[in-house]
Image: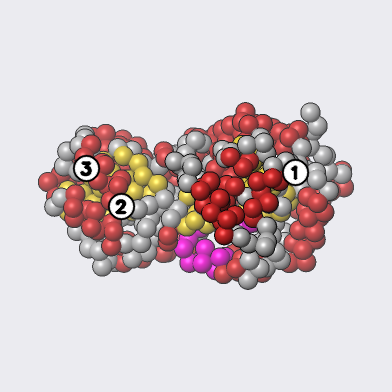
């Protein structure tokens, strides 16, 4: 098995010197992006990525990078988000590692041509779907999970045989710098590149014409990316943050429900695309739920969460101000509410007496604030969810299977999870993506492979049976049409009259 190409010592030194943690990151200007795209295009056209051995070597290099630099990633995410080591390892590194290992174990099967059903006229032919790589793709990660949201799509792009340019978020500067330094040391230097660009620069980068754009972020940002991609007819995958509703039924285990919601809502200080954004709580259990959530916050983070090593900070001053302002203009604080601007700290907060018209219900939160609204029954919950744009996730907690079934079938969302939260977005065997306002396309496992592949239909015919196929040729005669119509009626499944062609 071939190993990934090693960069030259000069390039290694330049990359290391300019991206050491703690130093300002060197911005990638448009002309440099043009050069990187050209190099990746040349490498792809030379067929470097087509061989199974090359793809396996790159995937194994991803695993090796994560294992050998775990401490570096923990340090970088600690600097950017005050992210606890436990959260970094579990929700960032292990997740990406599992994706890579799953792809390694299944790559040969995924690369095999898929044979399709034959009919009468193709009984001696071969009908297959061949998955071929798209070319050079760009992957733009989001700051709330800066490793996961760059590397999970990258695993799919590598497995599918593409070259890729990765653009991590500038908001998480230390993590972006680390990826900028490490990826050239582990992955092929001609096929895979990292650029450091601001969000405002990305539309210009996209207009350089890639073969696919993979973007995670907000709806407003995704709209700009999609418009830029449309100008060059570039297909896009958009994973977009939205307001993820969480229904809590009167028939549920309140203690367990509170634990799972608290973990999902305040993990990474609430800065998660898949966290519950608000609770639709049955009026009969509101008081018990609030008390249980308060108890869980005390168990998880103690009486002084700002001193807890398990609780993070807002990624930036802008994010801090945005969340604080919504918090102060919405509902009533039942738990938390403290802020420390110098630390970008917002205490894990639960809001009650929240109305749909409140500021916090009009925008994505992406912070450690959980609003609770009350409903009288599941019908009101479903109606409330359907009044909003389609979210990335819908959550439902109930011991009544009929309630779960109704929430799952009568609402539309990118994903659904009952009696837990977030886990459906971490499973390698399930597609993760949005619908409507929460995006298009998906990733994880085989779904990532498909996202970065073109399914090419191939019919491998012989020149036999011309004694039958001659019926399609001019000059057209009524007799030939009658024979073709009769033949198409022979099949009970009716695969279409063109089967005789």
Based on the picture, tell me whether residue 92 belongs to the magenta stretch: no
| First in residue order: circle 1 vs circle 2 | 2
The residue that mark 3 highlights is: 403
- The magenta region covers 212-226
Secondary structure of residue under mark 1: loop
Measure how far apart labels 1 and 3 are at the Cα level: 59 Å
The residue closer to the viewer here, 487 or 132, is 487
Q: Which residue does the image show at 24% across and 53% down from the upper left?
A: 382
Left or right, 410 with reference to 97: left
Measure how far apart labels 2 and 3 are at the Cα level: 12 Å
Which of discs 1 and 2 lies nearer the camera? The answer is: 1
Left or right, 122 with reference to 255: right
Based on the picture, tell me whether residue 216 belongs to the magenta stretch: yes
Q: Is residue 319 above or below residue 22?
A: below
Q: Residues within 10 Å of mark 1 (few under 14, many from 20)?
A: few
The residue that mark 2 highlights is: 411
The numbered dot on residue 463 is: 1
The residue lying furthest to the front in this view is 479
Q: Is residue 318 above or below residue 18?
A: below
Q: Quadrant of residue 435?
A: bottom left
Q: Which residue does the image show at 74% across and 62% down from the upper left?
A: 33
Whether residue 394 appears in this view of the structure is yes
Left or right, 238 with reference to 384: right
Q: Residue 160 appears at what percent x and percent y?
A: 66, 43
Which of discs 1 and 3 lies nearer the camera? The answer is: 1
The residue closer to the viewer here, 221 or 405, is 405
Q: Residue 288 appears at what percent x and percent y?
A: 16, 42
Q: Which residue does the image show at 59% across and 47% down from the upper left?
A: 500
């Amino acid at each position: 098995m071939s190993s990934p190409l090693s960069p030259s010592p000069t390039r290694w030194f330049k990359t290391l010197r300019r991206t050491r943690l703690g130093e300002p990151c060197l911005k990638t200007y448009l002309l440099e992006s043009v050069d990187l795209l050209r190099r990746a295009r040349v490498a792809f056209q030379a067929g470097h990525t087509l061989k199974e051995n090359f793809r396996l070597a790159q995937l194994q290099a991803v695993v090796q990078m994560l294992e050998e630099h775990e401490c570096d990633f923990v340090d970088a995410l600690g600097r950017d988000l005050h992210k606890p080591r436990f959260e970094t390892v579990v929700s960032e590194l292990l997740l990406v590692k599992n994706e890579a290992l799953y792809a390694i174990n299944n790559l040969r099967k995924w690369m095999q041509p898929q044979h399709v059903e034959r009919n009468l006229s193709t009984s001696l032919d071969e009908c297959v779907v061949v998955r071929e790589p798209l070319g050079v793709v760009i992957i733009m990660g989001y700051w709330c999970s800066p490793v996961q949201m760059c590397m999970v799509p990258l695993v799919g792009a590598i497995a599918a045989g593409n070259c890729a340019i990765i653009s991590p978020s500038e908001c998480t500067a230390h993590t972006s710098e680390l990826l900028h330094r490490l990826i050239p040391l582990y992955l092929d230097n001609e096929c895979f590149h990292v650029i450091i660009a601001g969000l405002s620069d990305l539309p210009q980068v996209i207009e350089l014409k890639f073969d696919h754009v993979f973007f995670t972020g907000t709806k407003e940002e995704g709209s700009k990316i999609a418009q830029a991609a449309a100008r060059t007819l570039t297909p896009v995958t958009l994973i977009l943050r939205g307001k993820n509703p969480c229904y809590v039924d009167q028939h549920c285990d309140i203690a367990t429900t509170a634990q799972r919601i608290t973990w999902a809502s305040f993990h990474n200080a609430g800065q998660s695309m898949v966290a519950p954004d608000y609770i639709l709580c049955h009026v009969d259990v509101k008081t018990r739920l609030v008390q249980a959530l308060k108890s869980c916050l005390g168990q998880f983070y103690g009486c002084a969460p700002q001193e807890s090593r398990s609780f993070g900070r807002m990624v930036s001053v802008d994010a801090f101000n945005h969340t604080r302002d919504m918090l102060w203009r919405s509902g009533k604080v039942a738990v938390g509410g403290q802020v420390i601007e110098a630390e970008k700290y917002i205490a894990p907060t639960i809001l009650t007496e929240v109305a749909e018209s409140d500021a916090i219900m009009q925008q994505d939160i992406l912070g450690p604030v959980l609003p609770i609204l009350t409903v009288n029954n599941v019908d009101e919950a479903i109606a409330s969810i359907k009044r909003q744009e389609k979210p990335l996730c819908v959550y439902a907690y109930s011991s009544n299977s009929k309630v779960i079934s109704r929430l799952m079938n009568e609402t539309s969302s990118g994903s659904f999870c009952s009696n837990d939260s977030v886990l459906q977005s971490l499973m390698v065997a399930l597609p993760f993506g949005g619908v409507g306002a929460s995006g298009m396309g998906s990733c994880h496992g085989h779904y990532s492979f498909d996202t970065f592949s073109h399914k090419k239909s191939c019919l491998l015919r012989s020149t036999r049976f011309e004694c039958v196929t001659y019926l399609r040729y001019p000059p057209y005669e009524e007799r030939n049409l009658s024979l073709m119509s009769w033949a198409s009626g022979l099949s009970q499944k009716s695969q279409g009259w063109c089967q005789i062609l």
